[in-house]
Image (tube, rainbow, N blue to C red):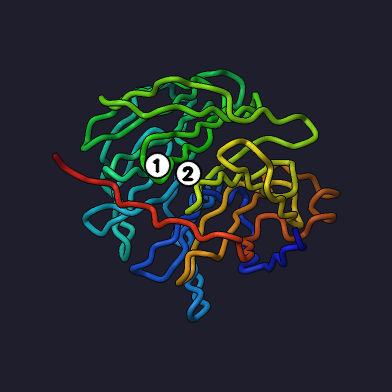
Amino acid sequence: MPDTDVRLVWQVQALLGEGPVWLPDEGALRFVDIKRGRLHRHVPADGAQEATELGGQPSFIVPASDGSLVVGCGGQILSVEKNSAATSVLAEIPMSAHNRTNDATVDGQGRLWFGTMDDEERRPTGALWCLDRGVLHRMGGDAVVTNGPAISRDGQTLYHVNSGERTIWRFMIGDGPSLQDGEVFLQLTEADGYPDGVVLDSEDCLWVALWDGWGVRRYAPSGELLMTVALPCARVTKIAFGGTDLQTAYVTTARVGLDAAALAAQPLAGGLFAFEAPAAGRVLPAVRLGA
């Protein structure tokens, strides 16, 4: 596989860049900076770059069926107006005060699947949740730090990441909703770094961002490693596919926890990067609001 050219899109210097999502109606990429409480927007067509101060710890941002945005923030799921950033609460998550939301995705039925984690990264109090038309379901998958989830093209399979244990699980999605027949899809090693955000492309290959692993990897549904893309910083958090052909992979990164020497060695840490992927991604469905 020839080298893939990675380019810097925005030297945003995010403390903890996360949750990238492409919104075709805007022709824009949205993502968050969890630790700075910011929502970011990048428009490739004209180079526009915007930051909105939301406060708290927004960890993901996804589209909603009414044209607003759904944002996980601390212990809440918020509805955020695109233009004004006015918020309302869609759901309060019944969990420990030291927990917060982390990564998320949306399935073809408009259900929001998201993970929570211990913000102190010590206790296995994080879990996987599903918000289905206003009703919260706790789905299990207990972990100190959850990541993913990602859902296959046919809506039948869910990938769930236990980052601390470097394990990616695969489940079948049942009625209810429910998760069944869990199996370990990937077990990474210390040399690999930690699996962070994951996303599936149009060929149902799983892209894994590697925290302290300096890159992203693409795995076949069989678990075979197909591709590695190196990044110029260690803490890679997630990718999203965008552009008119959905074949530009945008990559968020972080600089949180890096000392002066590490930052000097990787001055682009916290930047937004992009490269051209071998397969297109898929547009994320909107969260279905109401009954």
Name the residue rendered at 38%, 53% in the picture.
284
Q: Amino acid at mark 2?
A: Ser
| Residue 172 shown left or right of residue 271 in the figure | left
Residue designated by label 1: 72
As displayed, is residue 219 above or below residue 84? above
Task: Out of 209 and 174, give the one closest to the viewer.
Answer: 174
Tell me if label 2 and label 1 are in contact, CB under 8 Å: yes
Where residue 20 appears, as percent x and y from the top left, is 50, 54
Q: Where's residue 231, x and y in %? A: 73, 56
Q: Nearest the camera: 48 or 192?
A: 192
Q: Earlier in the sequence, mark 2 or mark 1?
A: 2
Q: Residue at x 60, y 43 (%)?
A: 220
Q: Secondary structure at mark 2?
A: strand
Element at badge 1? Answer: strand
31 shown above or below 141? below
Residue displayed at 84% across by 55% down? 265
Q: Is residue 240 shown to the viewer in this render? A: yes
Q: Which residue is mark 2?
A: 59
List the single residue furthest toward the front.
222
Q: Nearer the viewer, residue 173 or 234?
A: 173
What residue is at 42 percent from the left and 34 percent from the top? 157
Which amino acid, by three-letter code, is at mark 1?
A: Gly
Q: Residues within 10 Å of mark 2 (few under 14, many from 20)?
A: many
Q: Examine the rendering and report whether any part of residue 50 can be seen.
A: no
Q: Is residue 45 left or right of residue 176?
A: right
Location of residue 53 in the rendering, given as x and y in whole percent from the top left corner: 45, 57
